[in-house]
């Protein structure tokens, strides 16, 4: 198996992004727009068919008119009737949420396939986002199975967490400090369990997009590839934490600047009414937070393919695959065209451009010449 090096893997993902045309930021924008707009269309159609959209509007109007939640609920119940109300809530709400999640999962498989082809140097086009559509039924079933398994595991972990809290409360009711320690330990164990479940099925989308396997076959293969690799994938994901903390810091900074600037401006204007002052500060904060959100959205167009590309390289690594060599006769990003592993090859890091520069992993020098010393890979500044 290829030697695993997270820093070099991430460097390879960045290099693949620089060599991709169309640029992955543009493809990420298209993917985000399609996933978001498609979800809204599904929600609106089901809302109109089931009446859930009118239900929300009716409740909002009743709440404004009567100013009381109980009265508004009674008014909606009288207007709709019990059966129609239950139908609107279950079908318009529950089914809409499920279908939106499945649609976004279908698009996510296509995006995973795009990033996988990108790091393999195949130069995929925007149309690769729709690679899962010919197998939409099996892909949607796969997404549904993964969601069910995650829900069941989460439910089991939640029940275990609740049982531990109840038992600890009964046994250590007089020892508050000990109860708090047990509760914290149980909580962190619960979080660790949720992370384990997430990582367990983390490679399903890549398997579906790459090899065309779906259903339980994709789920079993993801579990097999993740055996012994949970820590590696977790630390890979964790290594991007600094970028997300930077985004949170930008939002907080803009909010503080907005509050300070607007507050000082209104105070110096001589307005004595505290309501005006609070309204001005709130508007200033909201305006700058929206601006920060726009900046972060643009930044995420770069960060998302970076993260997904690194995970795609991890997927290839779990199979001992040289991602820089396209499948013979393939390479066009089509459905179910996996890159085949190369046998009996000694792999070294190859940072120089060439036919094996898609990920930076390639065969070592075979001509007996003196290879150039590789450049030291650079990871994120805070990693």
Image (cartoon, grey):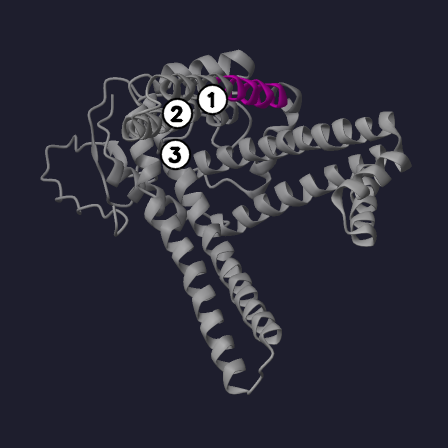
User: Relative to 5, does residue 57 appear above or below in the rendering?
Assistant: below
Q: Residue at x 54, y 42 (%)?
A: 125
Residue, disc 1: 158
Magenta-drawn segment: 139-153
Q: Is residue 147 magenta?
A: yes
Q: Is residue 161 magenta?
A: no
Q: Are marks 2 and 1 in contact (CB under 8 Å)?
A: yes
Quadrant of residue 164 within the rendered picture: top left
Give the spatial CA distance, label 3 vs label 2. Answer: 24 Å
On the rendered image, what quadrant is the N terminus found in? Answer: top left
Classify 10 Å Cα crowding around label 2: few (below 14), some (14-19), many (20 and above): many
Q: Is mark 3 on a helix, strand or loop?
A: helix
Mark closest to the chain's N terminus, 1 or 3: 1
On the rendered image, what quadrant is the C terminus found in? Answer: top left
Chief secondary structure of the magenta portion: helix
Q: Are marks 3 and 2 in contact (CB under 8 Å)?
A: no
Give the spatial CA distance, label 1 vs label 3. Answer: 28 Å
Mark closest to the chain's N terminus, 3 or 2: 2
Whole-percent x and y of residue 107? 59, 35
Residue, disc 2: 190
Residue, disc 3: 311
Q: What element carries label 2?
A: helix
């Amino acid at each position: 198996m290829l030697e695993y090096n997270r820093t070099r893997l991430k460097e390879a993902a960045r290099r693949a992004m620089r060599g991709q045309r169309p640029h992955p930021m543009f493809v990420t924008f298209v993917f985000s727009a399609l996933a978001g707009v498609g979800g809204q269309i599904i929600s609106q159609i089901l809302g109109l068919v089931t009446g859930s959209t009118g239900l929300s509007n009716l409740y909002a109007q009743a709440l404004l008119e009567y100013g009381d939640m109980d009265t508004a609920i009674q008014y909606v119940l009288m207007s709709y009737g019990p059966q129609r109300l239950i139908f609107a809530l279950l079908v318009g709400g529950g089914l809409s949420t499920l279908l939106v999640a499945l649609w976004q999962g279908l698009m996510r498989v296509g995006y995973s396939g795009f990033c996988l082809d990108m790091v393999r140097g195949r130069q995929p086009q925007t149309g690769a986002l729709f690679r899962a559509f010919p197998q939409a039924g099996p892909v949607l079933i796969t997404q549904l199975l993964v969601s069910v398994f995650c829900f069941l595991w989460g439910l089991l972990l939640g029940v275990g967490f609740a049982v531990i809290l109840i038992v600890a409360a009964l046994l250590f009711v007089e020892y508050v400090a000990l109860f708090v320690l047990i509760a914290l330990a149980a909580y962190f164990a619960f979080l660790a369990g949720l992370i384990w479940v997430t990582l367990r099925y983390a490679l399903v989308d890549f398997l579906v997009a790459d090899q065309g396997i779906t259903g339980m076959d994709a789920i079993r293969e993801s579990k097999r590839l993740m055996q012994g690799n949970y820590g590696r994938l977790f630390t890979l994901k964790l290594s991007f934490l600094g970028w997300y903390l930077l985004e949170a810091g930008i939002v907080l900074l803009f909010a503080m600047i907005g509050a300070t600037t607007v507050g000082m401006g209104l105070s110096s204007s001589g307005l004595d009414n505290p309501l005006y002052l609070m309204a001005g500060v709130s508007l200033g904060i909201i305006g700058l937070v929206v601006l920060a959100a726009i900046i972060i959205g643009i930044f995420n167009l770069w960060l998302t393919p970076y993260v997904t590309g690194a995970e795609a390289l991890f997927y290839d690594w779990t199979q001992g695959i040289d991602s820089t060599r396209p499948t013979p006769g393939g390479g066009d990003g089509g459905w179910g065209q996996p890159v085949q592993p190369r046998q009996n090859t000694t792999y070294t890091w190859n940072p120089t451009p060439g036919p094996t520069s898609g990920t930076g992993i390639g065969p070592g020098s075979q001509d007996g010449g003196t290879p150039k010393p590789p450049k030291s890979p650079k990871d994120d500044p805070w990693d």
